[in-house]
Amino acid sequence: MIDERRPHVVMPHPRHEVLLGSHDLGVATFTAELFHAGMFPLIVFNGANAPTTIERFPRGEAVHYREHALELGVSDGAILVEPEARNTGDSITLTRALLESCGIEVGSVVLISRPYQQRRAYATCKKLWPEVDVICASRPLPLDEYIESIRDVDRVINMLVGDTQRITVDAERGFAIPQEIPNNVTNAYDRLVQDGFRKRLL
């Protein structure tokens, strides 16, 4: 979780950043960059493991993200770790509980995630933590540069397709607010599924 306060802007409830765990260590890198730019005072790294992260982050996503942020100069006192979340819903509810247990009042949050996860993260937060203002952010990379940074085009496309499906399914299951999906996005999703990118489908 990232506190996205802008310099010279006074807000009654400081924003904090919730960083959603994943296979993409660049999420933690981007968080460290924003921290050093003075954008927020507190980070919450969350995430246990998923099938896509267990080999890369054997001690859990949040633990590895924290270690990476410390290597990049983020102070340990500015980091909280929530190591149990196994999906986006867990990330929101468990982070909320952690902050409440620490007596930290939250009026707004910035969710830092992979680029294609932002819309689903927003919808989940608005459903499960409706009283906070929420902003989503990710590394500002074009798709081809993002794929190059991950070095696995198959993984990226399969994850993107899975996240797109979950925007609809999570809303139907009551885990997220509904969102309108443009026809061109639906058509692209259908083509990718037909082309075999089904590994992350529910």
Image: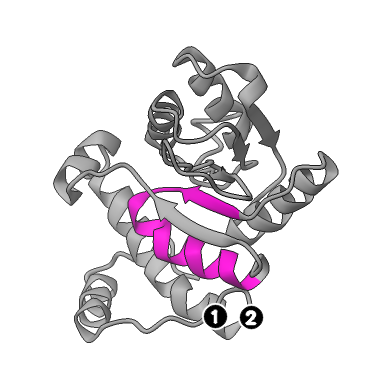
Q: Horizontal placement of 77 versus 100: left or right?
A: left
Report the colour scheme. one colour
Residue 171: give its label: 1
Q: Horizontal placement of 186 versus 29: left or right?
A: left
Residue matched to label 2: 174
What is the magenta range?
108-127
Decide: is 7 above or below 33.
below
Q: Amino acid at mark 1?
A: Ala
Q: Residues within 10 Å of mark 2 (few under 14, many from 20)?
A: few
CB atoms of marks 2 and 1 within 8 Å: yes
* Dominant secondary structure (helix, strand or loop) of the stretch shown in magenta: helix
Decide: is 23 above or below 114.
above
- Residue under the point 51% across and 79% down: 169
- Residue under the point 30% across and 64% down: 197
Q: Amino acid at mark 2?
A: Gly
Residue situated in front as seen by the camera: 102 or 147: 102
Q: CA distance from mark 2 to mark 1?
A: 5 Å
Screen quadrant of the N terminus? top right
Q: Position of residue 50 (x, y in %)?
A: 57, 47
Q: Position of residue 38 (x, y in %)?
A: 44, 28
Q: How many marks?
A: 2
Q: Is residue 126 magenta?
A: yes
Residue 144: give its label: none
